[in-house]
Image (cartoon, rainbow, N blue to C red):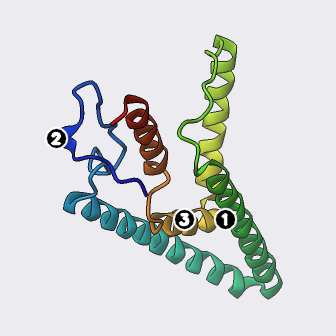
């Protein structure tokens, strides 16, 4: 983890990037930062509890009707969740030390329309298949326990790069 100079000693030309959920507290990692990190973990625990209770009811209803269907549904849930967790784990590991994602060229109107419809389809899939995505919620909870969040790490790398280029 990089140690940055105090905020007050930064040149005026350097702005601290605001991150979703963390604001600029990630820079100095004071009390406010740790409060936000604890709240993040508590939110993911709440989401996981809600999804877990939905799954409990869903699988309970299936088990009452057919033990075979229950085993199949449970197997699909476990395989899907493990697949999601492995995929996300690999993506985080691949991009952990990258300060920024590759810049993309502007998209055309046709590409924008396709992306829009694909996003709507993704939302429908997410709503219908949310019970099959407990692995996503488990992984997000586990990622909340990392020393740096997945959103904070690229910002820290960019700041270190910027400070190094300015000789600070």
Residue marked by disc 1: 85
At 35% from the left and 53% from the top, the residue drawn is: 3
Residue marked by disc 2: 8
Label 1, residues with CA under 10 Å away: few <14, some 14-19, many ≥20: many
CB atoms of marks 1 and 3 within 8 Å: no
* SS class, disc 1: helix
Distance CA(mark 1)–CA(mark 2): 40 Å
Residue that protrudes farthest toward the left in the picture: 8
Front: mark 1 or 2: 2
Question: In the visual, does 7 lie left or right of 130?
Answer: left
Residue that protrudes farthest toward the front in the picture: 167
- Please provide percent x and percent y for residue 127: 58, 52
* SS class, disc 2: helix
* SS class, disc 3: helix
- Please provide percent x and percent y for residue 61: 64, 80
Residue marked by disc 3: 137
Circle nearer the N terminus (1, 3): 1
Image height check: is 41 above or below 18?
A: below
Circle nearer the N terminus (2, 3): 2
Find residue 148 and report its image quarter: bottom left
Front: mark 2 or 3: 2
Distance CA(mark 1)–CA(mark 3): 9 Å
- Please provide percent x and percent y for residue 40: 36, 62
Label 3, residues with CA under 10 Å away: few <14, some 14-19, many ≥20: many
Distance CA(mark 2)–CA(mark 3): 38 Å
At 42% from the left and 72% from the top, the residue drawn is: 45
At 83% from the left and 84% from the top, the residue drawn is: 68
- Please provide percent x and percent y for residue 50: 46, 71
Q: Nearer the viewer, residue 155 or 60?
A: 155
């Amino acid at each position: 983890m990089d140690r940055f100079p105090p905020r007050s000693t930064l040149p005026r030309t350097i702005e601290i990037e605001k991150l979703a959920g963390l604001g600029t507290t990630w820079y100095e990692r004071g009390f406010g930062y740790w409060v936000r990190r604890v709240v993040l973990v508590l939110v993911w625990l709440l989401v996981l509890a809600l999804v877990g209770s939905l799954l409990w009811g869903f699988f309970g209803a299936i088990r009452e009707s057919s033990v075979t269907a229950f085993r199949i549904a449970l197997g699909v849930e476990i395989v899907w969740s493990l697949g999601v967790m492995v995929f996300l784990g690999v993506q985080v590991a691949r991009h952990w030390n990258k300060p920024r994602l590759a810049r993309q060229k502007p998209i055309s109107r046709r590409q924008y329309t396709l992306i829009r419809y694909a996003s709507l389809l993704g939302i429908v899939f997410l709503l219908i298949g949310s019970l099959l995505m407990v692995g996503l919620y488990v992984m997000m909870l586990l990622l909340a326990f990392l020393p740096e969040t997945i959103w904070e790490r690229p910002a820290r790398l960019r700041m270190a790069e910027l400070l190094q280029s300015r000789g600070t």
